[in-house]
Image: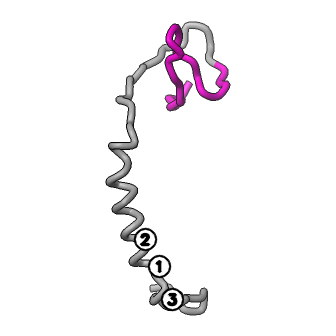
Amino acid sequence: MPSITLQAHFDGQSIVLDEPFELPDNARLLVTVVAPTTDFDRDPWASLAGTGLAGAYGDDEPEYTPADVRRL
């Protein structure tokens, strides 16, 4: 069986897959516990991304059409 990454969570008692996936009996698993993210962690990055997008797609930017795109 090839390796695959599956999303899961701990419900307080068991590790639960977020989506159904057929596992064979006695399948070997590696479990990585990911530190929880908080809005505090995300807010600076979201703000930076928003600032960059606002500069790239501001009202003073020209509208480009597919005809403006050239292959190099």
**Pointer 3: residues within 10 angstroms few (<14), some, or many (20+)?**
few
Label 1 element class: loop
> Quick check: marks 1 and 2 in contact, CB under 8 Å?
yes
Disc 2 target residue: 53
Look at discs 3 and 2 and give the one toward the viewer.
2
Under mark 1, the amino acid is Tyr
Q: Residue at x 50, y 91 (%)?
A: 62
Label 3 element class: loop
Q: Is residue 21 left or right of residue 44?
A: right
Depicted 38 relative to depicted 42: above or below: above
Under mark 3, the amino acid is Arg
Between the C-alphas of marks 3 and 2, the distance is: 23 Å
Magenta-drawn segment: 1-22
Q: Which residue is at the front of the view, 69 or 15?
A: 15
Look at discs 1 and 3 and give the one toward the viewer.
1
Disc 1 target residue: 57
Under mark 2, the amino acid is Leu
| Residue 40, position as x, y percentages in the image | 34, 43
Depicted 72 relative to depicted 13: above or below: below
Question: What colour scheme governs how the chains and residues are painted in the rendered image of this protein?
Answer: one colour
Disc 3 target residue: 70
- What secondary structure prevails in the magenta region? loop
